[in-house]
Image (cartoon, helix red, strand yellow):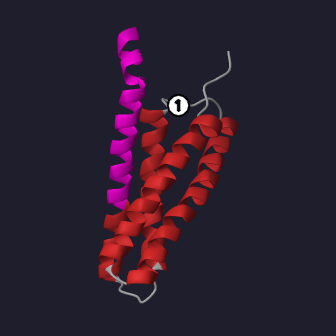
């Protein structure tokens, strides 16, 4: 049992899972964006970006909490603080994502540019988010 616990928390294991979860979250984000654009085409990007971001956020939070930081329930107050901090850091890093996606769309005005900018912004955002979450949200209990 101790061996399994140490294996799941190795740096390489966590990095692999975090990368896989980031890809799943990105895929969910882009799939929802594409669905919104298909179902409700609009000259504005914001409906698709907001819907995709919400889908990616929910999935990523659940995966991070359980499989990256192995965070269990402690108390209602503690959980609310985690959700709020996770949300604040998500907003900050989402601004990076949106900035790249909107900038690429504005410059080149193609779907490829939009998603390329989005993928680049998400990658930068996820790296920043992991660092913030590890330090402030899902920090190990002090002994």
Residue 22 lies, in percent from the top left, at 39, 49
Q: Main secondary structure of the magenta part?
A: helix
Report whether residue 85 is seen: yes
How many discs appear?
A: 1
Most extreme residue toward the top, as rendered? 2
37 vs 57, left or right, is left
Indicate left or right for 117 with 35 as reference: right
| 75 shown above or below 131 | above
Residue at (36%, 11%) from the top-left corner? 3
Q: Secondary structure at mark 1?
A: loop
The residue positioned 42% from the left and 90% from the top of the image is 43
Residue drawn where x is 37% and y is 57% of the image = 26
| Quadrant for the N terminus in the image | top left
Which residue is at the front of the view, 75 or 117?
117
Tell me residue 56's x, y (percent): 43, 57
Q: Which quarter of the image is occupied by the C terminus?
A: top right
Q: Let me know if residue 17 is in the magenta part.
A: yes
Residue 85 percent coordinates (x, y): 65, 47
Asked where in the image residue 92 lies, by quadrant, the reply is bottom right
Q: Which residue is mark 1?
A: 71
- Is 49 left or right of 32, judged from the image as shown? right
User: Which segment did they paint magenta?
Assistant: 1-28
Frontmost residue, 55 versus 19: 19
Of 128 and 18, the residue lying toward us? 128
Residue 6 in the figure: left or right of residue 73 = left
- Residue 134: x and y, percent? 57, 36
């Amino acid at each position: 049992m101790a061996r399994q616990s140490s294996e799941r928390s190795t740096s390489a294991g966590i990095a692999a899972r975090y990368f896989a979860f980031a890809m799943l979250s990105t895929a969910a984000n882009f799939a929802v964006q594409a669905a919104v654009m298909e179902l409700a085409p609009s000259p504005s990007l914001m409906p698709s970006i907001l819907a995709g971001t919400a889908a990616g956020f929910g999935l990523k939070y659940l995966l991070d909490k359980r499989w990256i930081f192995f965070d269990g329930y402690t108390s209602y107050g503690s959980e609310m603080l985690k959700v709020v901090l996770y949300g604040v850091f998500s907003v900050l890093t989402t601004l990076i994502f949106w900035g790249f996606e909107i900038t690429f769309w504005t410059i080149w005005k193609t779907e490829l540019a939009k998603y390329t900018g989005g993928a680049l912004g998400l990658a930068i955002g996820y790296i920043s988010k992991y660092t913030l979450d590890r330090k402030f949200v899902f920090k190990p209990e002090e002994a």
